[in-house]
Image: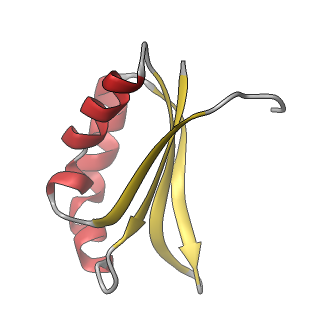
Amino acid sequence: MLIALIARDKPGALEIRKANREAHLAYIEDTGVVAQAGPLIVDGEMAGSLVILDVDDLQAAERWAKQDPYAKAGLFGSVELIEWKKVIG
């Protein structure tokens, strides 16, 4: 099942993002469930994340999201998990 994780950074948290980026990217690689991912951009700056997870169920996506180094560092002001259906691409 594909799940879209849409996370918005807390205001003024760019340094938290930068400090935890390497661990976040390693987590993505190590877990092997990320189909696509990238930062959300606002006014030319990273301001959140869009991650497409390929997992068994919503609970697996929730577990993945909680263990993300960005989440553990307190980067996000909000996180939304939504089932997603790939149609194009």
User: Camera-side residue: 11 or 26?
Assistant: 11
Q: In which quarter of the image is residue 58?
A: top left
Work out whether 42 lies above or below 20: below
Which quadrant, please, contains the N terminus? top right
Which quadrant, please, contains the C terminus? top right
Residue visible at 15% across and 53% down? 72
Residue visible at 23% across and 72% down? 16
Work out whether 89 lies above or below 46: above
Task: Report x, y in % for residue 19.
Answer: 21, 67
Total numbered circles: 0
Task: Report x, y in % for residue 26.
Answer: 28, 39
Task: Report x, y in % for residue 67.
Answer: 20, 39
Task: Report x, y in % for residue 29.
Answer: 36, 31
Q: In which quarter of the image is residue 35?
A: top right
In this rendering, would 23 be left or right of 54? Answer: left
Query: What colour scheme governs how the chains and residues are painted in the rendered image of this protein?
Result: secondary structure
In this rendering, would 79 be left or right of 45? Answer: left
